[in-house]
Image: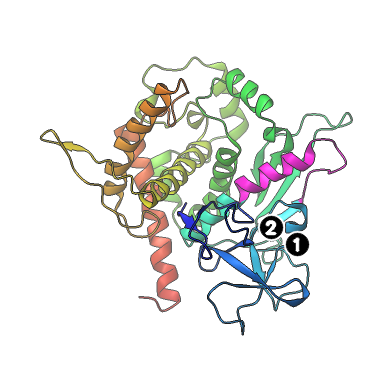
Amino acid sequence: MKRFTCQSCGQLVFFENTRCDQCHAPLGYMPETASLAALVPMEKGLYHPLGQDKEGSARAFCANHAYDVCNWLTPALQVHDAFCFACQFNRVIPNLNIPGNMERWRKLEIAKHRLFYTILRLRLPVKSRQQDPQEGLVFDFLDDSPQSWPPIMTGHSHGVITIATKEADDAYREHMRVEMGEYYRTLLGHFRHEIGHYYWNVLIRDGGRLEQCRAVFGDDRTDYQSALQKHYARSTPDNWREHYVSHYAMSHPWEDFAETWAHYFHIVSTLETALSYDMTIGPMVDGKSVPTHRSDPYLHMPFDDIMEAWLPLTYAVNSLNRSMGLADFYPFVLTAGVRTKLRFIHDVVRNVQRESNQSSGLL
């Protein structure tokens, strides 16, 4: 995530802000430029970004801005009360008649918008359900009810990502993290994992990369339900970290890919944040810290440079967290086997970027 400042007064602002705390200028995110803009009100509920000409720059807030769950902007020429790029993928939102669901939805949208920030920064292809009725991406935020059984589970199927609304409750999510023996369980982590399944369909299955992927992650044709049952029934081998980023990644090649994909998103997004705040912790060579390469981890930083920047950063921030009595910021071990899988995903993403640049004439 970039570091954002208010163009009106220079105050540091954050991705989710809708108003500058210092000068009170309204703020809106423009996904086409990956920028958070201070806005000048116009007529009919429109705005134009500060410093831009009014002609052709008019913007409107997403329809979900009325619920205080979205600060993204749409071009003024779109239909009135249109949804922004991120919110167009919603199909079912939480039942707002249920007490507490407004705040749960807000947390879900914060995570989902951060997901789409990364998708756009990586220039990954994504189609809505309108563009692809069979496999297009769509989100269902579903509530358990007394009549529903089994309980709603977070998951992915043919482009439909279901997120159980209860995952937005910190107490429930922490309870499940402990019960499942997980090091890490967050809303953003759920989104990044499930979108990994979507991109396995788009970039691996339909992208002509099945055999290369199987050589790295294993044969996805293994029966999924049977593999899950065996996973939860067997004891965990002591050396599992040599090849898997998480215990759950051992269950099936699909889950291994999705877990590794999620970690790639964790890494490039957090590295961009660290670099934007001038955090340049580098590896030690002959007793001296070597500065981190400062190229864009989303588009230009080579994989080896990403790893060289990421590992010392996690050591430092884990130590800071422990100094505050908190859990580790990144409680995972990136062994050589895991890094091989991360490199595969990095190469797939960069190949997709090159193909996109070639088709748009940027190369």
Residue 66 location, quadrant: bottom right
Residue type beneath disc 2: Cys
Q: Does the magenta stretch include residue 104?
A: yes
Above-or-below relation of 70 to 356? above
Q: Which residue appears farthest toward the bottom when viewing the image? A: 55
Residue positioned 50% across, 25% down in the render: 183
Left or right of 127, for residue 358: left
Left or right of 221, for residue 217: left
Magenta-highlighted residues: 92-112
**Label 1 with label 2: CB-CB less than 8 Å:** yes
N-term mark: 1 or 2 = 1
Residue type beneath disc 1: Ala
Residue positioned 40% across, 51% down in the render: 272
Say few, some or many: other residues with alpha carbon within 10 Å of mark 1 (under 14 / 14 to 19 / 20 or more). Answer: many
Where residue 305 sits: x, y (%)?
27, 48
Which residue carries the number 2 mark?
87
Above-or-below relation of 120 to 144? below
Where residue 157 sits: x, y (%)?
66, 46
Which residue carries the number 1 mark?
63
Question: How far apart are the two marked residues, 1 and 2, measured between alpha carbons?
Answer: 9 Å
Q: What element does badge 2 sit on?
A: helix
- Is residue 66 in sight in this rendering? yes
Residue 324 location, quadrant: top left
Q: What element does badge 1 sit on?
A: helix
Residue 266 bears which disc, if any? Answer: none
Residue positioned 48% across, 29% down in the render: 250
Left or right of 103, for residue 184: left
Disc tally is 2
Left or right of 215, for residue 19: right
